[in-house]
Amino acid sequence: MERKDFIYFLTVGLCLAFIVGLLFFMSSQTAQCVKNPFIYGASHMGNVECSCIQFNNPTCPAQFSFNDTSFIADPKVCGGTGSLYHRIDIKDLNITD
């Protein structure tokens, strides 16, 4: 094998190894981002805190907050009995035909 052939195959091999390594790195980063994009972005920026309100429902907007280590989405109870579940009134059940 001549010197030019050796340099050519070494360069091609190094390029292929770099591309394969880059693909593995991108797939691991993509999986982390898809799992929770808020924490992923905040962890890369560092020292981030955000408290968010979604105004799709103006009478009872959804709220959540996150920082670079945690995501908190507390269930919000709007109106009613203060419970997350509706109470069942047994007297209103009609079992007869």
Image (cartoon, rainbow, N blue to C red):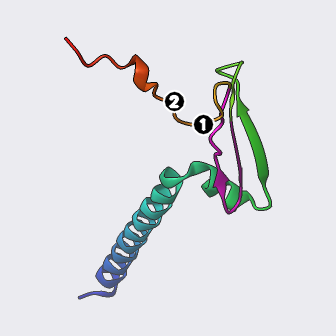
Q: Quadrant of residue 84?
A: top right
Vertical side of 29 occupied by 61: above or below: above
Compare residues 57 and 7 and report the one nearer the observer: 57
Image mark for residue 83: 1
- Residue at the spot x=68%, y=60% of the render? 44
Image mark for residue 86: 2
The kind of secondary structure element at disc 1 is: loop
Q: Which residue is most to the left?
A: 97
Q: Label 1 neighbourhood size at 10 Å, few (<14), some (14-19), many (20+)?
A: few
**Residue 45 screen position, x and y as percent:** 73, 58
Compare residues 88 and 71 and report the one nearer the observer: 88
Q: Quadrant of the N terminus?
A: bottom left
Image mark for residue 26: none
Amino acid, disc 1: Ser
Question: Total label count?
Answer: 2
Q: Is residue 22 left or right of residue 68?
A: left
Amino acid, disc 2: His
Tags 1 and 2 touching, CB below 8 Å: yes
| In magenta segment, residue 42 | no
Q: Is residue 93 left or right of residue 97?
A: right
**Residue 75 screen position, x and y as percent:** 62, 41
Q: Quadrant of the C terminus?
A: top left
Q: Which residues are magenta?
A: 63-78
Q: Is residue 51 left or right of residue 28?
A: right
